[in-house]
Amino acid sequence: MVKSLTAIAIATALLFGLALFEWFYVAEQFSDFGEEVQTLYDKTDNGTANAEDARAVQTSWEERKSRLHVWIPHNDVNKIDDYMAEAVRLIGEKEYPLALAKLEILLHLSKCIPGTYRPEAENIF
Amino acid sequence: MTLVIIRTAIIYVTLLIIMRLMGKRQIGEMQPFELVITLLIAELACIPMADASIPLLYGIIAVVTIYVLHEIVTLLDLKVKPLKSLISGKPSLVINKNGIDDYQLKKNNLDVSDLIESLRSAGYFSLDSIDYALYESNGKFSALPKEDYEETQTSLPLVIVDNGKYDRKNLQIAGLGADFFDKLLKKEGVKKLKKVLVLTADGTGKIYLQVKGEKYRTLKTEYPGGKTW
């Protein structure tokens, strides 16, 4: 009885601890990534962004990605990978209007992906 | 992850309720909540293992959630008596001194032929050789035979009428016509065939008859032409 109750308490604490950690961690990672993309977006909008700026954001994302793989489905990570790579190429070629479109998608993803892991009815069912 | 925990809990509870509603037929020597675990664990472990796009952690979290739920349900099952019957169900007494309890059979999604099959598996071939029979909460079948039950099992009884309908195949095996049994039923005061829950006939001429809502009766008859089997 005591053993069972202890096991239940430990496992429940572990589950909810991990769930809370995931919730805040994923939100924070995407919030930081969103800020970086927003800066790049503003620079691109002004026509001052260059390939190095874009690559810096991409490198930062690559680091985050290696940690996020543990917490979120890999398809979501790949989606960002693809748009990021396209944006880097377009900025390098000074194709700013096209790059802005890709960056807007990245901004949207960085806002909506953490929301898909919240325990809300639309996500549960 | 919170989503995985909530979704796992919803599926677990839903499966548990469904298993309980399905009755004893779906359970094989396991309590309903044990069967639910068996059904879920294999799938939960396999999906993240085979699909590389799902983090392995999702599978681990789901399995740990199932473990927690299982431990809670096991504790409730052992310690809280009123919940025990709700979670695991109660044994169903399907044969008593009056014969077959049709209500209990229906409640567990079983019919007379399922009961006769269970009796045969337990080594009892004649319905009147049993005083009590029940399906345990885990679906296992238990029977208490009459003291002299071996003497009543002299020939293999065939089910002639099962829930108001003739079993044509068994009539053919017995080599008897439905009209013979129609006359026999009329003689016994049974006006409609659909009122008969079960009628079995063995090779020595022993008939087991139970009309719905009545106590069973056994009769001795002689088949046309002195037929035996």
Image (cartoon, coloured by chain):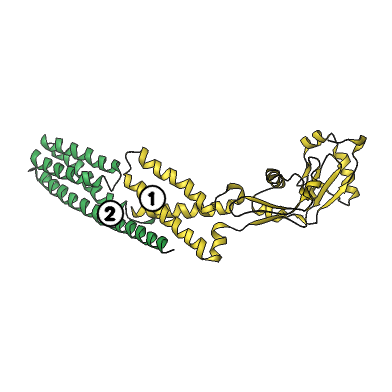
Q: Residue B198's spot in the image, x, y percent?
A: 78, 47
Say the numbered circle drawn on residue B62.
1
Q: Which chain is in green here?
A: A
Q: Secondary structure at mark 1?
A: helix
Q: Residue at x 40, y 61 (%)?
A: A3
| Nearest the eye: B103 or B148 | B148
Q: Residue at x 26, y 39 (%)?
A: A78
Above or below for B226 versus B208: above
Q: Is residue B54 left or right of residue A93?
A: right
Above or below for B79 versus A81: below
Q: Residue B11's spot in the image, x, y percent?
A: 46, 51
Q: Quadrant of residue A58?
A: top left
Chain letter of the residue beneath label 1 in the structure image: B
Q: Residue B217's spot in the image, x, y percent?
A: 83, 52
The crowding category of the residue bearing disc 2, from other C-alpha atoms within 10 Å (few below 14, some 14 to 19, many at least 20), is: many
Chain letter of the residue beneath label 2 in the structure image: A
Q: Residue at x 91, y 36 (%)?
A: B226
Read off the residue under disc 2. Answer: A22
